[in-house]
């Protein structure tokens, strides 16, 4: 007999076409940055973040990325700079405790041998701006991994502290992402 169960089975999506959500694992992922001034550079990171990558049908180009970053988790070497970076001169973490990234498109191919080009909106320090960057992305049934190195102009997000007159801070900040996300 033909009943609702048979109809539902016939209408089911083909194998491999389901949408899978992957949780970004902070223990194996990194959100890092490098800022520079005339005389030195400083490497830092955010230690508290979470997010998801939703992939329809196993296709990276159809994926959506969402990342939440807790700005108070910023750390830098040397550690005496941590307080200044958290202050209103830079991230003003009390006023802006979150930064977010939401992808708007992922296309195949990218600069410098990247597998993809990711575009999205970065909300930081009360400002939301579009960013586009090359990334190496791999999607498997159990995991998504991505690696990207690119730069942003900090002043685009109102991070305008100039530094000391004899040691000015450069506008470009290098972003280094290593993302590992496991199937939920």
Image: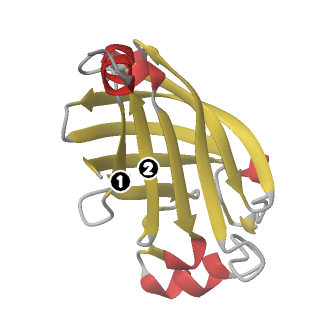
From the viewer's perspective, tell me whether residue 167 is left or right of residue 107.
right
Name the element at disc 2: strand
Q: In this view, does 127 lie above or below 39?
A: above
Residue 131 x, y percent position in the rendering: 63, 34
- The foreground one among 182 and 169 is 182
Coloring applied to the structure:
secondary structure
Which tag, 1 or 2, sits closer to the chain's start?
1
Residue 144 x, y percent position in the rendering: 28, 39
Q: Quadrant of residue 164?
A: bottom right
Residue 142 x, y percent position in the rendering: 18, 41
From the viewer's perspective, tell me whether residue 139 is left or right of residue 153.
left
Q: Is residue 68 above or below residue 145?
A: below
Residue displayed at 26% across by 66% down? 27
- The foreground one among 123 and 22 is 22
From the viewer's perspective, tell me whether residue 58 is left or right of residue 34.
left
**Residue marked by disc 2:** 52
Query: Mark 2, residues whose alpha carbon is within 10 Å: few (<14), some, or many (≥20)?
Result: many
**Residue marked by disc 1:** 23
Q: How far apart are marks 1 and 2 (CA)?
A: 5 Å
Query: Mark 1, residues whose alpha carbon is within 10 Å: few (<14), some, or many (≥20)?
Result: many
Residue displayed at 37% across by 17% down? 7
> Residues at badges 1 and 2 in contact (C-beta under 8 Å)?
yes
Residue displayed at 45% across by 29% down? 63
């Amino acid at each position: 007999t033909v009943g609702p169960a048979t109809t539902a089975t016939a209408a089911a999506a083909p194998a491999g076409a389901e949408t899978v959500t992957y949780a970004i694992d902070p223990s194996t992922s990194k959100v890092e940055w490098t800022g520079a001034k005339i005389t030195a550079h400083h490497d830092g990171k955010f230690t508290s973040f979470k997010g998801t990558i939703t992939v329809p049908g196993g296709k990276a180009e159809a994926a959506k990325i969402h990342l939440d970053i807790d700005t108070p988790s910023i750390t830098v070497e040397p550690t005496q700079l941590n307080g200044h970076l958290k202050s209103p001169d830079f991230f003003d973490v009390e006023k802006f405790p979150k930064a977010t990234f939401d992808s708007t498109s992922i296309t195949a191919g990218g600069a410098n041998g990247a597998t993809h080009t990711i575009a999205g909106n970065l909300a930081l320090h009360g400002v939301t701006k579009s960013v586009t960057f090359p990334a190496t992305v791999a999607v498997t049934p159990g995991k998504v991994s991505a690696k990207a190195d690119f730069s942003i102009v900090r002043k685009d997000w109102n991070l305008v502290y100039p530094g000391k007159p004899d040691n000015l801070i450069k506008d470009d900040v290098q972003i280094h992402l290593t993302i590992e996300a496991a199937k939920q």
